[in-house]
Image: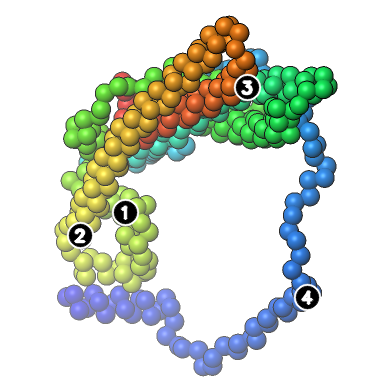
Amino acid sequence: MARAVFGTLCAALLALTGCHAPTGSPRQMPVLQPAAPQLPITTRTGIEPDVSLFPKEPSGVPFRRPAEYRRLTADECRRFAIANAPFADDLDQHPENNPPSHPKLHKNAVERAETSRLVRGHAADELRNRAAGEALEDFYKLAEAEGQFDLLVSAETELRQQLEDALKAEKAGLKDRADIPALRRRLLDLEAQQAKLEAGIGALNASLRARLGLPGNDTLPLWPADPLRVKPDDVDIERAVVTGLQYRPDLNLLRVLSADGAGDLADAVLTSLNPLLGKLEPENLLRLLLAPLMRDPKRHQASDTERVARALAARERQADAEIRAAAVLLRGHRSAIAARTLEVKQVEAKIEELLIKQKAGLNVTAELATAKLDLYKAKADLLSAVIEWHLTEVKLRQAMGLLVRSHE
């Protein structure tokens, strides 16, 4: 019987495709190669930027940030990013998540709809978790940029005062002990840093507005309102790993597929992990017609389940490594913060000591000016260390799948 069916199918396919082969080979057209461009011959010359249109002296007008902002907290940033995660709502509202109106007419329709709802729901949470992490990264980078800008403004004010005092002393006929050219160079360097920060602040504002669904043409910049508090305790790494393996949406998605073996859904997910994990051979007409005779559905489902299980095991190992790495980095950043905090306190103590000497009539003007600039640099280094800690904590929470959970 199977042989008769096979013969009938082959005859039908030959009728569809035609049984006469072409009598001659197609004529091949010559491939025209474009002519190679001819470049002139030259010798080595100096490569130097042309900055003739830029000022050679520090600007008389210091950089100033706006007076009003749109206040944004870290929790608002996370929630808005989750609400505006691209494609997440589409996955939750996918039509295959609901069973057909007449489920009895479709075999396993209710089970397939429930599997679709779970798989696409976990995929949507993975997108939201990732979107929240990326938005919080922009948020803390913006906080660092705004804080560093204020410190540069303070350092610039101090340098301008030193330059003004040095110029007055020079006019009075005194020797230039403050090194006026060096002060001007440092002011130019501060202006360059401020310009770079201002550009970065603008880019971070644009990125955050897009991620959070805020109007892109708002003239008021965002103000990252956060205490930047650093937690003093170490992370329990083993507990963090267990929590992450339990809550991560990408792992739960694979667990649903591993338990269900959801056919096309499993193939789609595996293809998203790596295109070569999916089925590359297209389903042609012959394969579709002969599928009931040539393939055991149970064996095919078992194969999909095994592939998903292997992918799940690999992802769990990757998640374990990501959580452990972030937890260790968090500990290292906290140690760096402790060292930077001591440095700030030492410079502050030195300034207090110099101020006491100055009140006593000693000439410590140069030392005091240097110490004040050292304090701004120490505070800038401390701020950078604190931001690194917060960025790493965001990575840890994202690696554990906690950013998408409302109570975290």
Residue in the picture at 45% in, 38% down? 87
Q: Secondary structure at mark 3?
A: helix
Location of residue 239 in the rendering, given as x and y in whole percent from the top left corner: 19, 32
Q: Amino acid at mark 2?
A: Ser
Nearer to us: label 4 or label 2: 4
Q: How busy is the neighbourhood of tag 2: few (under 14 within 10 Å), some, or many (20 plus)? A: some
Residue 113 visible in this rendered orientation of the protein: no
Q: Which mark is residue 366?
A: 3
> Identity of the amino acid at label 1?
Leu
Label 4: few (<14), some or many (≥20) within 10 Å? few
Q: Which residue is mark 2?
A: 303
Residue at 62% across, 15% down: 363
Question: Extreme bottom residue here?
Answer: 23
Residue 90 falls in image quadrant: top left
Q: What is the secondary structure assignment of the residue under circle 1?
A: helix
Cα distance in 3D space between marks 4 and 2: 62 Å
The image quadrant where one finds the N terminus is bottom left
Disc 4: which residue: 41
Q: Report the Cα–Cα distance between label 2 and label 1.
A: 12 Å
Left or right: 152 in relation to 302: right
Callout 1 crowding tier (Cα within 10 Å): few <14, some 14–19, many ≥20: many
Q: Report the quarter where the C terminus lies.
A: top left
**Disc 4 and disc 3: Cα gap in Å?**
57 Å
Residues at circles 3 and 2 in contact by the CB criterion of under 8 Å: no
Observer-nearest of 117 and 164: 164
